[in-house]
Image (cartoon, rainbow, N blue to C red):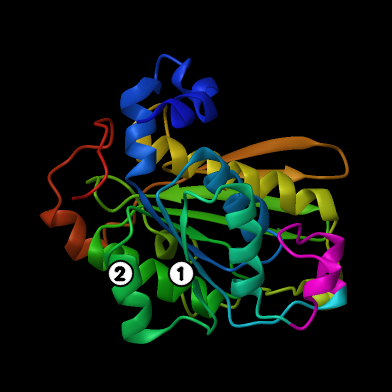
Amino acid sequence: MNDEQLLRYSRHILLDPIGIEGQARIAGARALIVGAGGLGSPAALYLASAGVGKITLADGDAVDLTNLQRQILHAQDRIGQAKALSGQAALKNINPEVDVVPVTERLAGEQLAALVAEADVVLDCCDNFDTRHAINRACVQHRAPLVSGAAVRFAGQISVFDSRRRDSPCYHCLFPEGEKTEEPRCAVTGVFAPLTGIIGAMQAAEALKLVCGVGEPLLGRLLLLDGLTMEWRCVRFARNPRCAVCADHAAETSLPLEEGVAPRA
């Protein structure tokens, strides 16, 4: 770490749980962010500011005027540009040292699996259950920790799933695929702009904790925020031993819930 980097990241280095070693882990980390919208914007900005070495930013949409109310990664002069490319420009402006890889199509299938396989942490910042479940399956298959967030109207939620740990549930344990679940869209129901910033910033915080191996991640806990009252509610949940996605995988995973896990090689 050179003198400029020591200065840039000095406020992290001053934190005993992080220090130089933790900042070095951040610099060597690879993050995959699926969705460069309301949640992905603050998440990506904070990860880039913190010095995450490689950020793959995936989004198949283009910047629209209606996005600018909350999607702080984008700007008026980039309306019509692919969100992944717009986000790349914003992140490089914040921190030129970060390798930002834009993916301008909706992730699915083998491409999604390949990107998850090479990531140290995955942030689900998308807006539909089909993609969320596809991300979850890929994360379980490749033992990649997953930070999942959602925000609509005045309601936000966040949780962490880490299939490297034996007792960690997966997204399917909490929201089984195929069940009838309301899927409200911001374009129809609206969303309170700062709410996406709150949840997205928390996703970045959980991702950095996972990368550094510090603190206690939101495993087995779903935090729910009512933006009108600014009240938090915590719902605890456990791994489903008969989960169609993670049951067989969990039996092969040896690390217990309470042990920290360093980033993958």
Say what amino acid the circle numbered 1 marks: Pro
Q: Which mark is residue 260?
A: none
Q: Give the vertical position of 44 relative to 2 (above or below).
A: below
Question: Residue 122, image x and y in percent?
Answer: 42, 58
- In which quarter of the view is residue 252 placed? bottom left
Q: Which residues are magenta?
A: 66-80
Say what amino acid the circle numbered 2 marks: Val
Q: Secondary structure at mark 2?
A: loop
262 relative position to 87: left or right: left
Q: Does 109 appear in magenta?
A: no
195 relative position to 141: left or right: right
- In which quarter of the view is residue 217 placed? top left
Q: Secondary structure at mark 1?
A: loop
Of 63 and 127, which appears nearest the observer? 63
User: Which residue, given by chain and number where applicable, does mark 1 sit on?
Assistant: 176
N-terminal of the pair, mark 1 or mark 2, is 1
From this viewpoint, which residue is outermost toward the front? 3
Question: Residue 192, image x and y in percent?
Answer: 85, 56
Question: Residue 39, image x and y in percent?
Answer: 66, 58
Q: Give the vertical position of 153 relative to 13 (above or below).
A: below
Of 22 and 191, which appears nearest the observer? 22
What distance separates the C-alpha of mark 1 from that of mark 2?
Answer: 9 Å
Q: Residue at x 81, y 48 (%)?
A: 194
216 relative position to 233: left or right: left
User: Which residue, given by chain and number where applicable, does mark 2 sit on?
Assistant: 245
Say whether marks 1 and 2 touch (CB < 8 Å).
no
Q: Residue at x 73, y 49 (%)?
A: 197
Bin the neighbour count of mark 1 within 10 Å (Cα to Cα): few under 14, some 14-19, many 20 and up: some
Q: Residue at x 24, y 49 (%)?
A: 164
- In which quarter of the view is residue 89 placed? bottom right
